Amino acid sequence: MNDPGTLLVWSVLLIPTGAAVLLALIPAYTVTARLNMLASLLTLAAAVGLLWARPPTSPYLIVDDVNVVFIVLNTLVAFTTSVFSASYIAHELETGRLTPVSLRFYHAMYQGLMGAMNLALVANNVGLMWVAVEIATLTTVVMVGIYRTHEALEAAWKYFILGSVGIALALFGTIIVYLGARGVVGEGLNAMAWSELVRHAAAFDPALLNLAFVFLLLGYGTKVGLAPLHAWLPDAHAEGPTPISAVLSGLLLNVALFALLRFRMIMAGNPGTLAPGPLMVTMGLSSLLFAAFMLYRRHDIKRLFAYSSIEHMGIITFAFGMGGPVANFAGLLHMTMHSLTKSAIFFAVGHVAQAKGTQRLADIRGLTHTHPLLGWGLVVGVFAIAGMPPLGVFMSEFLVVSSTFARQPLIAIPLVVGLLVAFAALLLQVSRVAFGEPQGSSEPVHASYGPMVLHLGLVLVAGVYVPAPIVSWFQHVARLLG
Amino acid sequence: MNGLSFDIAHLLAGGLVLVSFMLLYQARMYALLNLFALHAVVLSLSVAWQALIQGAPHLYVTAAIALGFKGLVIPLALHRIVQRLHIHRAIEPVVGIGLTMLAGMGLVALSIGVVLPVTAEAGSLAREDLAFSMAVILLGMLMMVSRHNAVSQVVGFMSLENGLILAATGANGMPLVVEISVAFSILIAFIVIGIFLFRIRERFDTVDLHALDTFRGERR
Amino acid sequence: MALITDLIVQGAQMLLVLLLAPLLTGFVRKVKARLLRHQGAPLLQPYRDLLRLSRKEIVVADTASWLFRVAPYLMFSAIWVAAALVPTFALNLVFSWSADLIVIVALLGAARFFLALAGLDVGTSFGGIGASREMMIAPLAEPAMLMIVFTLSLLAGSTQLSSIAAYMSGPDVGIRISVGLSLAGLVIVAIAENARIPVDNPATHLELTMVHEAMVLEYSGRHLAMIEAAASLKLLLYVSLIGAIFVPWGMATADQGIAAYLVGVAVYLGKLAVGGFVLAVFETSVAKMRVFRVPQFLGAALMLGLLGTLLLFVSRNL
């Protein structure tokens, strides 16, 4: 326990947990909001420290190249979202949409969610990873239903049922992986440690791994929001408070995809298995096309960006399904960029909805005139997410498309069609929202612009220049992913 | 694997599948809850027997948790909820019972047909447990899909988790971490379910999900 | 010489079932009456009824065809042959090579076929109702029966009843859930086929609740006597079938002596008594089901049979 790496990784886990317990006990909102931000900042610091000092791999925890930058990303977005959440929830309290009673556990659940996601990222034991994803699901279910309206309850119930069934299928897949590993590695903890599994993967029974991967893809794929398992996603995003939408889109979907990637690496290590690629490519492509077309007829602004999340998760899954160094690199880059951009968009959208008092797209117009910073921030964010250069998402999408054209030109056609359809839909919607005759109230809103600006700035910088260490890190991981 | 001990394991696991079928065709709420208690009891017996023949004492804990929590506490709590909230006590299936049962049979045959060839190298006990637990899982999902009532969907989900516990115990040597965590998560899950059931009742007169469907946000 | 003794023993079995059938029916009725705190008719009353009926004149409707007169004989002979084939006190008798479960199912099916036709033959509406209800029950009972036959023959490796009984009394069976499921299914099928409560009431006089009784409403005299005898034989058949398969101990094999045969007969009588008693208790404790629920009841038997087969398939292929 003496080396700094172990200390840091335990801090990344224990700070949120401790904060959750503490926050559950304190009722005063302002105090808990500040504590929330402080805890997130400390966790971020610990995560950054992990870039330099890593703990030794234990059967339970692992910090390796694959997850270290995700941990940093996770804690960064968690911190910025906590800053956003402070001002957003303050406004909700003022307008009376939320009561202090219903908010009592909000911050505790938030930190609980962060702790669970961090645990899922650093877990070596695949069962522990599963537990962490389940806890993360449960905390978000509670938070989605926090408004207690009819729609919020329905969204939370649907999310709960679909998420739980997905989790159950993922556990079944995990058990089958253990069964396959047990014969080779022996019983006990080692047969559940991912580092051991990936080392011995070539010796496992391919048929078992195939069966396991189907269940894992269906199970964790539900959590990622791949069509046709996506039914919970739009409702959960639209009916929950916006900080939760940001965290869901920006972080939880990534964590679920990360879990899937861990297993994909195991599958890739065994040459006899059915290639996981075609399955992932199909699901990714169907998600992309489905979501791209659904973007046209949305009437609710948060629902619109929820479908955009489905679309981008589809692109990422497609990229990882294609495999190979370029596509994997693109997938990793896209995960990072999407996380930053989508959360920035939700930061803007949250304040926009508060300012205008509605989430309906038809009632929000002329944002750049009434709330310039929010409006232009939203415009930049939507340009980013639609894939315009020179923002970061463009590069990753370009890489995906070019590598697909090089290897499987026929598949690239629906890919490009989907991207273009989504591009057009998003630009259409945002042009109506941001420009034109102002509609709705013009009162200023006490917003925290910092997080949004920071994220969009990072995305812009990444689009122009990605520092060499990060590039080489991504490339290294892309090779590991197989 | 001794003949008699394998036979008893087969008996208990097969009994679990049988009770899952019986859960499928129940039309009345209290009968459903009592049958679910029976489901949990059969599961705990099966897990206890596995603990005996595998020589894995930590599985006794899992069996006790299944018996106490899912065999007693949860059915009692659901009884109370149904009574207090005056929940509509007849359960209507979406398609007829006959079709549901046939679909269930198909799912059992499917799971047996998928699992047995794939697990050719594992021990006979593990293979059988995996096949039967997949059958129970699929039957639980069928139950969730073929019912309109929220309480029966919850019961279906819990029978699904019972199937998972059976699979986890069949894979002998699986570390305790997973078992306790499965039980732990079930606990939390139920608390959340309970909260939502109460809150749903506040908003609607029945727990009939048809009423919820009118608020489907998908079309917005 | 050995052949003659074997033939005599086989003939004795055939006669035994014929003689015991009305006794079983009378026993069941007596127990039911006693459970309801009536005196009940004497045990031997069914014999007297058969005798009385056989002495009476036959009254045949004008619209009846030759089938009407022939059907009772066909029914009786088919069921008597089937009942005579089921091992009662001894295994591997001379004709036991033909005692195949599927043959028995076929014979019973043939008997039911003729009875239903006879019910339709006269053209009354009660006959029609009875025949249509019987035909609703039969297509569900037979597949369930066949599933049970599959399970048992998968277990024992043969459909021959003597082999099945020998296997079940041996040590290889172990505790199997498939056997339990088959037993439950067979009991349900037996209740349906014998027109017992909860499927049909054998003592009813209300045409709207009849199935079997409605088909035989037009019969009188010795025809009715044959049909009643056939119904008793059917009951005896099912009880002995359940006894032979699921309680197979105590039966003599063909090479043992007279003493073993007598022991076998005594055990068989005991099984009949227990079976009859359980049936009577069951009938008095359950209410008759509504007719449209009968398919669900039989569907349950089919499911039990299917599940038993599937579970057996699993344990065989492990």
Image: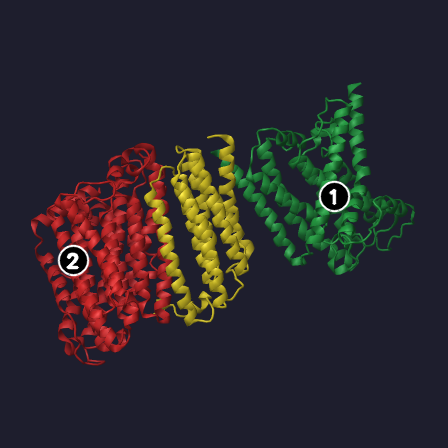
The picture's colour for chain C is green
The correct choice, above or below, for A356 with respect to B190 in the image is: below
Q: State left or right for residue C286 relative to residue A163.
A: right
Amino acid type for the residue under numbered disc 1: Leu
Helix, strand or loop at label 2? It is helix
The residue located at (50%, 41%) in the rendering is: B12
Dot 2, how many residues are within 10 Å of its Cα: few (below 14), some (14-19), or many (20+)?
Answer: many
> The chain shown in yellow is which?
B
Helix, strand or loop at label 1? It is helix
The correct choice, above or below, for A424 with respect to C40 in the image is: below
Quarter-wise, where is residue B54 in the image? top left
Query: How far across and how far down the image is residue B123, in percent?
Result: 41, 33
The correct choice, above or below, for A162 with respect to A4 in the image is: below
Residue B99 badge: none
Q: Quadrant of the C terminus of chain A?
A: top left
User: Which one is nearer the viewer's eye here, A216 or A388?
Assistant: A216
Closer to the camera: disc 2 or disc 1?
2
Q: Which residue is mark 2?
A: A76
User: Which one is nearer the viewer's eye here, C280 or A478?
Assistant: C280
Q: Which residue is mark 1?
A: C235
The picture's colour for chain A is red
Amino acid type for the residue under numbered disc 2: Leu
Query: How far across and how far down the image is residue A265, in percent?
Result: 25, 42
Q: State left or right for residue C10 relative to residue C54.
A: left
Dot 1, how many residues are within 10 Å of its Cα: few (below 14), some (14-19), or many (20+)?
Answer: many
User: In the displayed image of the protein, which residue is found farthest to the front?
Assistant: A25
Q: State left or right for residue A392 relative to residue C14.
A: left
